[in-house]
Amino acid sequence: MALRYLLPGQMQFMQQHGFDVLMISANGPELNDVVQNEQCRHIIVPMTRKITPWQDLKCLWQLIRIFKKEKPDIVHSHTPKAGLLGMLAAKLSGVKVRIHTVAGMPLMVEKGFKLRLLSFIEKLTYWAAKEVWPNSQSLYNYITEHRFTSTQKLRIIAKGSTNGINTQRFNTAALQPGIIEAVKQSMQYDAANTYLLCIGRLVKDKGIVELVHVFTQLQPHNPLLKLVLVGDFESDLDPLPDDVLQQINQHTAIIHIKWTQQVEYFMHLAQYFIFPSHREGFPNVLLQAGAMQLPIICSRIAGNVDIVTHQQTGLIFDTANEAQMQEQIEFALTHPGEMKQMAVTLQQTVQQDYQREHIWQTIWTTYQSLL
């Protein structure tokens, strides 16, 4: 999933610019698409997203064997588990250039023993890495404030982001009329309605509980207001409470769409984008909404605040604060002209600073300097 959704195009770019790229990840339904799109070799290592010590040790040993055989000049890891195992295996295998990109930290929403455990794992990953690349200034600040590693190891690529944004795809001029009509049918679109769009995993970490609570309070006073949730539930990792699931499934003004690759079409049809997540690194979905000139209302967390400036390029509310979320949504609904102007300003910033080719070129240049 990380290769398919977080890094599309980056591996192929490096392959076309002189590197022999080997991709490593767990198996999954996205694998064939990844190999076909990137045109790079791929090896399956069955890493898990959970804490699974025995499986993790087996994967660590498998990675060491791969690195000993392949003798890579660079190992670059993404996601917490791949970072821990990849950086340790690379260090033990004698790989000189070891880079870990931090695109979000699960520990930011944990407490007690799990927080201490995840903090130790994070520090261990950074110890094994030669360079640590937080993908936003906020994450950089968090890492330094909590002393996870020395500032000498830290580097932000360009102005942030892991992969940049494909502004040719996230562009109203690129939309196909036939797909627009199909998406309209899937959400029973009515031009008289106002659509509040949220895209992402439907889990507590993404702020879905508060969003549903706020929406069900607002909607009776705004009968033409609809909430569109695009994403899948994750009952095994971070399940939603039963009452929230019931609201999503039964409320006539809440439209649930399973995960789709056509998110830009939903952004084109919606009036506002709501993103109440509790933790992020540098969320691509906000860059995508920005590129589509869709007005944004989001939580005040690392990553979000690096993209959106309150009342300049969008609206921000304190994380998990339902009263503030409701206040900002109500402001947006009553000030559509101001919201549109904020969206225009953000679109200009995205086009100027976050083109994916610029991010790739900066990474390529950094690789060269490290070699």
Image: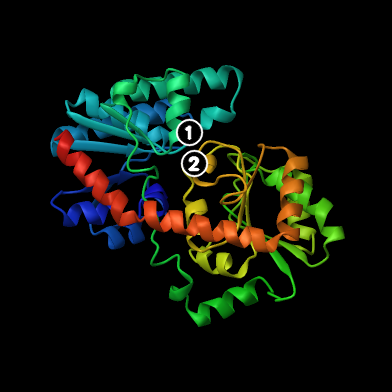
Tell me the SS state at disc 2.
helix
Q: How is the image coloured?
A: rainbow
> What's the amino acid at mark 2?
Asp
**CB of mark 2 within 8 Å of CB of mark 1?**
yes
Q: Residue 279's mark? A: none
The residue under the point 30% across, 32% down is 86
Residue occupying the far right of the picture: 220
- Mark 1 lies on residue: 138
Image x and y of residue 274, in percent: 64, 52
Count of all numbered marks drawn on residues in the image: 2
- Quote the CA–CA distance across marks 2 and 1: 7 Å
Quadrant containing the C terminus is: top left
Image x and y of residue 296, in percent: 60, 54
- The answer to which of 178 and 329 lies nearer the viewer is 329
Q: Visible in this render: residue 183? A: yes
Tell me the SS state at disc 1.
helix
**Location of residue 355 with respect to 84 vertically, above or below:** below
Q: Quadrant of residue 184?
A: bottom right
**Location of residue 175 with respect to 218 vertically, above or below:** below
- The answer to which of 292 and 16 lies nearer the viewer is 292
**Location of residue 367 with respect to 117 vertically, above or below:** below
Give whichever of discs 2 and 1 has the lower sequence position.
1
- The answer to which of 262 and 270 lies nearer the viewer is 270
- Mark 2 lies on residue: 306
> What's the amino acid at mark 1?
Ser
Crowding near pointer 2: few (<14 within 10 Å), some, many (20+)?
many
Image x and y of residue 98, in percent: 24, 31
Q: Visible in this render: residue 72? A: no
18 vs 320, left or right, is left
The residue under the point 69% across, 74% down is 188
The residue under the point 52% across, 17% down is 116
